Amino acid sequence: MSPISPRSPPLLTDALRLEPMRIHLLVLDEASKGLADVEAGRFTEARQTLQALKLRRRSQTSCAHDAQQR
């Protein structure tokens, strides 16, 4: 059963039909950019990046907590 009613306006029908293709092309574009970044050496190790994010989040949280206590 199609979610598109036979009475749907033509432009709406076209938009609903084209949206999955647009999303697919966006995903392919992002994957291509990611591979180009890896090929060019623009990447970091996941564990190092996660550790840096955790440390930054902790320092932001402790700064916000200190400001609330004042």
Image (cartoon, helix red, strand yellow):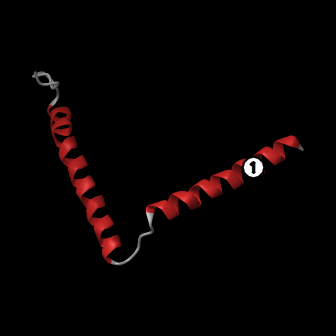
Residue 67 percent location from the top left of the image:
83, 47
Quadrant, the N terminus: top left
Quadrant, the C terminus: top right
Q: Which residue lies at the image location 27% right of the left edge and 60% below the top edge?
A: 31
Residue 9, image quadrant = top left
Q: How many marks?
A: 1
Q: Is residue 41 above or below residue 22?
A: below
Of residues 70 and 13, the one nearer the viewer is: 70
Query: In this figure, which residue is indicated by the disc labeled 1?
Result: 62
Residue 69, image quadrant = top right
Amino acid type, mark 1? Ser
Of residues 54 and 31, the one nearer the viewer is: 54
Q: Which residue lies at the image location 20% right of the left edge and 33% below the top edge?
A: 12
Q: Is residue 24 above or below residue 11?
A: below
**Label 1 neighbourhood size at 10 Å, few (<14), some (14-19), many (20+)?**
few
Dot 1: element = helix
State left or right for residue 63 relative to residue 31: right
State left or right for residue 19 relative to residue 62: left
Q: In this view, does 70 lie above or below 28?
A: above
Q: Which residue lies at the image location 15% right of the left edge and 26% below the top edge?
A: 4
